[in-house]
């Protein structure tokens, strides 16, 4: 009896193990055909369980070609399934999290925009790359992290790019490493991720794309710039993260025995996604246009609201929860036509409410901080237009903006100036900034950066004046509007290419320009890597990816989107190592400027 019981427990455990190794499907002994080839990775606990039960030959019969210890050093084995048999310890899980075998290690925020990481983004931040005390080993780690994610991006895209980059920058280090990684993968024909079925018929199938790697240091003014388009404003002034905006809404004054309490804030979250037609249409529009469009949508909905009430009464649904109504399907409804139009109307109402709330929150910031004044003034500075008001006046005006707004404005002035202000003038500005409550650390860093950049090249140029004021907005908004835009300037944008867009244009259209003529050229498909700035391909590119090493922003993204609209049949994608708004960027500059 004892022997039989022993055999059965052994058999049972063996069957359970074989089932696990067969991806949790019962293992059939005499099944024809080859097993699925796979790798088995175990820790010491797992090894101890398996070794008395299954021999190496039995493992091979199960399709296990390789068995390894979890904590041993090993090279990645692409496109081979793996079975992990380990204790669920923290150490083991951390180790498993380092295995990227799906090649999906990047975050797509838009059809044409991606960012490398969200967790641990400080590891690849502008500050991490530009720290004066960074060691070579630390820099290698940062570059490898960026390259691994970019490699994943191109595997997913199914295309091997032609790479261009500026010399002597972090972007060049990324280019060299990425070229090597792509080259090594292509050389291993059996395991290459860029052959056969992986490609699919994506939009990049007929011609290889151009990858332009640029360094954040070519343009530090744009990430500090106050903006005027909807998506960029939401990112600048609200809590907007991975396409979700979090708003604080006050719920009025509470009465209690102890007297009136201050308003309690309710937190609300909204997802701004491709399904939201209003967002897709207006995320790149100037804010006054957005406010007007929300108002028009609201008025057209009100005209249909009576129709909604009529439909509800026909269906006997007065007072019902809207969510419950939108769940109704044709067969439960009393009137098919009523049901088909009602959910559509309710969805329209939901989006109008959402954008009314978001746009109102943005408008509060514009009015409280005079962001229209900042935006217009910075545009003039960046485009070298005559200024109608002294910079010192704005910095000293207690009603114009937060200390951070003033610091952003002054840094843009300092970065864009052909000639840095004299020491005497600078002292006067510093005093005004300090009096306004500004932390001067970011300026400390920008001073060092400018001195260094001056040796390397001239300041970035931002084209000619890009805004035109159409007078105040009060006339745009009728009196019944949700948005009281009194006193806010109706600024209209004129398309001007920012430095990143200009660099892309030169390289995509194969234009000769001193700014990009010495950019390095890499073709990972060429057998021998050659260090050259001479492109072999002389034809303009149809598709391109611009990737900013050191962080990007929605202003740059929107500028590229607007640029490509005028180029029929061409596509571009914008990517960055991290996505930051001006507040987050100033914080990094401040840390770099600390003595």
Image (spheres, rainbow, N blue to C red):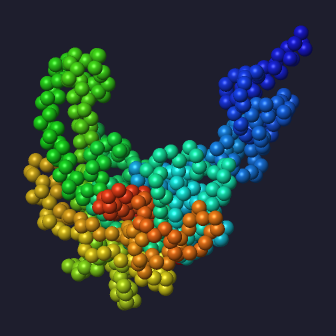
Residue 95 vs 363, above or below: the answer is above
Residue 111 is situated, as x and y percent measured from the top left of the image, at 40, 50
From the viewer's side, name the closer residue of 297 and 190. Answer: 190
Q: Left of 21 or right of it: where is 548? A: left
Residue 444 in view: no
For the point 14% across and 37% down, which residue is it? 302
Q: Left of 439 or right of it: where is 594? A: right
Residue 553 is situated, as x and y percent measured from the top left of the image, at 40, 61
Residue 416 vs 127, above or below: the answer is below
Residue found at the very far top of the displayed protein: 1
- Figure label count: 0
Residue 276 vs 478, above or below: the answer is above
For the point 42% across and 54% down, which residue is it? 113
From the viewer's side, name the closer residue of 104 and 158. Answer: 158
For the point 45% across and 70% down, which residue is it? 538
From the viewer's side, name the closer residue of 507 and 408. Answer: 507
Q: Quadrant of residue 393?
A: bottom left
From the viewer's side, name the closer residue of 181 and 334. Answer: 181
Residue 586 is situated, as x and y percent measured from the top left of the image, at 43, 67
The quarter of the rendered structure image containing the N terminus is: top right
Q: Left of 195 or right of it: where is 403? A: left
Residue 30 in view: yes
Q: Left of 127 or right of it: where is 251? A: left
For the point 60% across and 68% down, which residue is it? 176
């Amino acid at each position: 009896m004892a022997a039989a019981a022993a055999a059965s427990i052994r058999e049972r455990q063996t069957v359970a193990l074989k089932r696990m190794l067969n991806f949790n499907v019962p293992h059939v002994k005499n099944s024809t055909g080859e097993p699925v080839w796979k790798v088995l990775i175990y820790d010491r606990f797992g090894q101890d369980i398996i070794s008395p039960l299954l021999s190496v030959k039995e493992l091979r019969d199960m399709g296990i070609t390789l068995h390894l210890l979890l904590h041993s050093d090993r090279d990645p084995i692409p496109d081979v399934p793996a079975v992990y048999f380990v204790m669920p310890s923290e150490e083991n899980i951390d180790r498993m999290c380092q295995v990227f075998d799906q090649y999906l290690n990047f975050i797509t925020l838009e059809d044409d925009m991606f960012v490398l990481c969200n967790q641990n983004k400080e590891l690849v931040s502008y500050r991490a790359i530009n720290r004066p005390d960074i060691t070579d080993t630390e820099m290698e780690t940062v570059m490898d992290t960026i390259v691994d994610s970019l490699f994943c991006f191109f595997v997913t895209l199914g295309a091997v790019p032609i790479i261009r980059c500026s010399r002597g920058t972090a972007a060049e280090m990324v280019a060299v490493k990425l070229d090597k990684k792509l080259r090594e993968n292509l050389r291993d024909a059996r395991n290459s991720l860029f052959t056969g079925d992986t490609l699919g018929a994506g939009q990049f199938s007929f011609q290889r794309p151009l990858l332009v790697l640029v360094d954040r240091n070519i343009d530090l003014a744009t990430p500090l710039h106050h903006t005027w388009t909807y998506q960029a404003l939401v990112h600048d002034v609200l809590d907007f993260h991975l396409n979700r905006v979090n708003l604080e809404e006050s719920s009025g004054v509470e009465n209690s025995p102890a007297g009136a309490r201050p308003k309690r804030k309710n937190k609300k979250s909204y997802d701004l996604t491709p399904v939201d037609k209003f967002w897709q249409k207006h995320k790149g529009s100037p804010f006054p246009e957005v406010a007007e469009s929300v108002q028009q949508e609201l008025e057209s909905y009100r005209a249909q609201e009576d129709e909604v009430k009529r439909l509800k009464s026909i269906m006997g649904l007065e007072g019902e929860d809207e969510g419950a109504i939108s769940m109704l399907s044709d067969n439960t409804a009393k009137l098919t036509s009523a049901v088909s139009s009602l959910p559509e109307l309710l969805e329209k109402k939901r989006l109008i409410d959402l954008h009314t709330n978001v746009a109102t929150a943005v408008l509060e910031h514009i009015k409280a901080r005079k962001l229209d004044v900042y935006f217009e003034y910075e545009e003039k500075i960046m485009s070298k237009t005559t200024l109608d008001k002294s910079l010192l006046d704005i910095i000293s005006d207690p009603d114009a903006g937060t200390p951070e707004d003033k610091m952003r404005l002054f840094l843009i002035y300092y970065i864009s100036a052909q000639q840095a202000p004299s020491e005497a003038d600078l002292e006067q500005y510093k005093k005004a900034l300090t009096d306004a409550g500004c932390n001067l650390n970011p300026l400390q860093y920008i001073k060092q950066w400018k001195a260094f950049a001056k040796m390397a090249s001239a300041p970035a140029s931002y084209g000619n004046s890009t805004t035109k004021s159409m007078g105040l907005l009060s006339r745009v908004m009728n009196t019944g509007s949700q948005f009281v835009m009194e006193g806010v300037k109706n600024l209209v944008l004129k398309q001007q290419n920012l430095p990143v867009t200009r660099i892309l244009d030169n390289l995509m259209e194969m234009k000769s320009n001193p700014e990009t003529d010495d950019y390095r050229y890499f073709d990972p498909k060429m057998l021998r890597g050659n260090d050259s700035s001479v492109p072999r391909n002389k034809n303009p590119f149809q598709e391109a990816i611009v990737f900013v090493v050191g962080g990007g922003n929605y202003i740059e993204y929107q500028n590229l989107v607007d640029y490509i609209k005028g180029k029929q049949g061409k596509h571009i994608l914008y990517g960055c190592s991290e996505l930051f708004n001006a507040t987050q960027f100033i914080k990094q500059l401040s840390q770099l400027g600390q003595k």
